[in-house]
Image (cartoon, coloured by chain):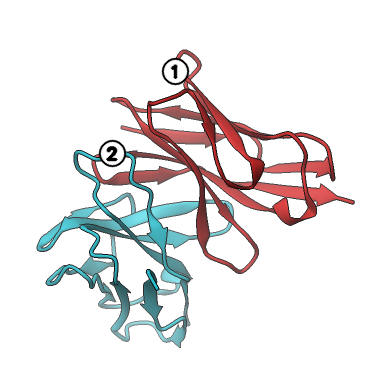
Chain colours: A cyan, B red
Amino acid sequence: EAQVTQNPRYLITVTGKKLTVTCSQNMNHEYMSWYRQDPGLGLRQIYYSMNVEVTDKGDVPEGYKVSRKEKRNFPLILESPSPNQTSLYFCASSLSSGSERYNEQFFGPGTRLTVL
Amino acid sequence: AQSVTQLDSHVSVSEGTPVLLRCNYSSSYSPSLFWYVQHPNKGLQLLLKYTSAATLVKGINGFEAEFKKSETSFHLTKPSAHMSDAAEYFCVVSEAGKSTFGDGTTLTVKP
């Protein structure tokens, strides 16, 4: 089944404890992206990747890191989480975001993160 | 720079009546425009996308959207609301890898 998977789905942690949220897709998509969703703010893009070893900042990259060492995986790293990073996080992938401009994104199920 | 404005944060309709969810956008280039739906405690699902082949776009579950370049709008409509349409709806503009979501419109459908 074609899908985007995220792990963990739920995480409660404490301030300053490094964590990684994994994202994997099995559709051979070039493009992957991370978003956070907060009430009343829609989804805001954190980082995106057009292809392996190519990553760019979205609108809210502060406090986050990403890497794209292989096509299928795009982990989100919080080196020193803070309470304002408590949010619902979504990973997404798309066939391409280059010349084919109309490819929709496929979203993972979300990871609910609480930082105490 | 691109932006999206969803003009209504909440819309309430009765079952069987028309639905209109409004979206205005700004973009430097010809935009890629999408509508996604999110049901409570669920992920996001694509409703429809504008591909420049036609200004009136048909999507899933009877939804349509009309692209109006002169008004920079991409409003979502459905002729007859169903209880299962109750959800949050997001208008999205994408350009060169960056995606900007509107703040969302919560649709309530009354019996």
Q: Amino acid at mark 1?
A: Lys
Residue B48 visible from this viewpoint: yes
Q: Is residue B73 above or below residue A50?
A: above
Snapshot quadrant of residue B65: top right
Please, what secondary structure does the residue beneath circle 1 have? loop
Q: Identify the residue at the far left of this view.
A: A53
As measured in the structure, the alpha-carbon distance from the residue carrying label 1 to the one carrying label 2 is 17 Å
Same subunit, tags 1 and 2: no
Q: Amino acid at mark 2?
A: Arg
Which class describes the residues within 10 Å of circle 1: few (<14), some (14-19), or many (20+)?
few
- Classify the position of the N terminus of chain B by image quarter: top left
State which chain disc 2 sits on: A
Residue B93 x, y percent position in the rendering: 40, 38
Picture disc at residue B69: 1
Residue beneath disc 2: A101
Task: Please determine whether, in this image, residue A72 is positioned above or below residue B65.
Answer: below
- Residue placed at 41% from the left, 69% from the top? A85
Q: Residue furthest right?
A: B111
Q: Is residue B7 left or right of residue A79?
A: right
